[in-house]
Structures are given as structure tokens and as C-alpha cells.
Image (tube, rainbow, N blue to C red):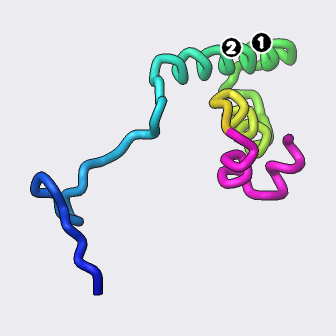
Amino acid sequence: MATVQFFKNFAWDNVPGTKPGGFNRLAVIERLADMREEWQEAAAVDGKTLTEAQAPVGVVMSDICDLLEFTPEEREAILGVELARVTA
């Protein structure tokens, strides 16, 4: 069996957490806020608020994938093959 060597006192039970590379919280917040504003405008056409509006979850998830500019492979991993195909 191979030996795993840790550095700087790391061990399996205290491996430091990681964040996705290139993750810009401010950019994500701004994009999500823009998306919310678009949804609010669309709901207002029917005289509804976002708490009253209904939307297909798969479409919302696809919109978020688009917003975060995921690759087709990432979209498929998140949405599953069928939903990724239908919403491409």
C-alpha cells in the first residue's frame, strides 16, 4: 500500500478547504441580482411578485448555469444529460 505524505501538519481530518478557482463573489452576486431583476420584470407583467411567480426548476437551474458561464460538460454534470440537452 502506498504511503500518503502530508505537509505542514495536514492530515485527512484537517485538510484545508478549497474554493473554486477564479470564483469572484462580487461578479456572481451582480449576475444573480441582474437575473432576479429580469424575473421580477417578467412576473410583474402578470401582476405578480417573485414570491407569487412560478417557474420550472430545470429552467431556473439552466439559467443559473448560463449566468455562471459553465461549459457544456459542467452543465451536463449539474443538470444531467437530458435537462442539459433540452435547455442547451
Question: Any magenta on residue 87?
Answer: yes
SS for callout 1: helix
Measured as percent of width and height from the top left, residue 63 is found at 74, 32
- Give me the residue at 78% from left, 36% from top: 55
Tag on residue 85?
Answer: none
Depth check: 84 or 41 in front?
84
Query: Where are the magenta residues, as a range?
Result: 71-88
Q: Are marks 1 and 2 in contact (CB under 8 Å)?
A: yes
The amino acid sitting under disc 2 is Glu
Relative horizontal placement of residue 69, taking residue 58 as reference (left or right): left
Kind of element beneath mark 2: helix
What residue lies at 85% left-to-right and 42% top-to-bottom? 87
Please, is residue 30 above or below residue 3 in the view? above
Question: Which residue was labeled with disc 2?
Answer: 37
In the foreground, 46 or 87: 87
Q: Quadrant of residue 48?
A: top right
Outermost right residue: 86
| Mark 2 surroundings within 10 Å by alpha-carbon count, few (fewer than 14), some (14 through 19), many (20 or more) | few
Name which residue lies at 71% across and 46% down: 75
Residue found at the very far left of the displayed protein: 9
Residue 40: in magenta span: no
Q: Which mark is residue 41?
A: 1
Q: Position of residue 42 (x, y in %)?
A: 81, 17
Q: Residues within 10 Å of mark 1 (few under 14, many from 20)?
A: some
Q: Position of residue 58 (x, y in %)?
A: 77, 45
Please, what is the three-letter code of the amino acid marked with disc 1? Glu
Q: Find the distance from the CA under tag 1 to the CA under tag 2.
A: 6 Å
Q: Position of residue 14 (x, y in %)?
A: 19, 58
Q: Nearer the viewer, residue 11 or 84?
A: 11
In the image, residue 61 above or below residue 22: below
